[in-house]
Amino acid sequence: MQFTAAQIALLVQGKVEGDADRAVQSFGKIEEAVAGQLSFLANPKYEEFLYTTQASIIIINENLELRSPVNAALIRVPDAYTAFATLMTKYQELAAQELTGVQELSYIAKNASLGEGVFIAAFAYLSNGTIIGNNTKIHAGAFLGERVKVGNNSVIHAGVKIYHDCIIGDHVIIHAGTVVGSDGFGFAPQTDGSYKKVPQLGNVVVEDYVEIGANTTIDRATLGSTFIRKGVKIDNLVQVAHNVDIGIDTVIAAQTGISGSTKIGSNVMIGGQVGVAGHITIADGTKVTGQSGVTKPVKNKNAVLSGTPALNIHDSRRSQVLAKNLPELEKRVKELEKMIQELLTNRVNE
């Protein structure tokens, strides 16, 4: 597909500076792009490449002042990064429209329901009662259990497993290898030291505009539902336990583990390798830095937490400074103890 600067500017609501008929066929990083490619500049650290790149069209912030002439056609927008993301999303949608129909060697149960414009790749498996919405793409090796519902314009990538009765909304993207709806970790301890499995009879509900990274696992509820609310973005390798409820537009980075029955508010940001204890509530707008351990409820909105156990970030940093100084403090305490002992000894001898 080929687009001119004028067409791109229309899509991102920008203004062309230079040759509006300049055309591109693909994307490239500003430091590596060649003729025929579109790039963008959002980070000032890369501005030097604006004057040397071979890219044909570059999206830049509208307030950027040029220090030298630029060969490329420029498209000025309020936010270059957001505009570029919007453009790539549109390009992806156009490319996906070419994927339609059912490939051979896929299995679709007779009572499964397929919407218009769907794509079912080879080796995908759709069980009894599966419902697939319009323009949704199911890629190779995906498994959808009985009565799974997937909404409109969603993408289920290769090797995704969605267990029975789970519900996936509209405009959802689930990346390769993710498992939705596996059993929660429920085992009742017995008097003889063994553990009895507690049946997990609920499901998982993934609402609209959610994106779930590769090899993430989301457990079904014991009873009721595990909820991933509208607009949530989950990175690769994240574990979400049974009956967790993740609020609207929350983002969670890789290798985070969220224990059962935890309720996370809206617009929460959780860094990588964070551990969250079970049966607690985290308030809206909370930010948790990477490798923190959240062990207690977070009641105040917009708190910033760090460390294990997670504390207010200012208290956490103070604790880290104090911990760093402990060897010197220990040395000083020992010296003071020695001085006191000498004074006591001298007093006894007088």
Image (cartoon, grey):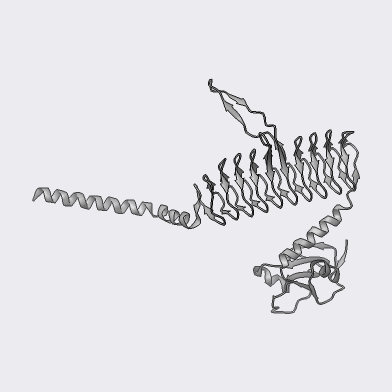
252 or 60, which lies in front? 252
| Most distant residue in the top direction | 192
Which image quadrant: the N terminus? bottom right
* Residue 103 position within the rendered picture, expressed as x and y whole percent measured from the top left: 90, 41
- Picture residue at 71% right of the left edge, 40% below the top: 204
Depth check: give the residue in front, 171 or 326: 171
Coordinates of residue 234 in the picture (x, y in percent): 68, 49
Quick one: 88 or 151, which is closer to the camera?
151
The image shows residue 222, relative to residue 282, as above or below, that is above
Image coords of residue 77 (percent x, y): 75, 71
- Residue drawn at x 69%, y 75% as measured from the top left: 63
Residue 54 appears in the picture as rendered: no
Q: Residue at x 75, y 65 (%)?
A: 83
Q: Quadrant of residue 260?
A: top right
Q: Locate residue 40 relative to residue 196 in the image: left or right.
A: right
Residue 143, image quadrant:
top right
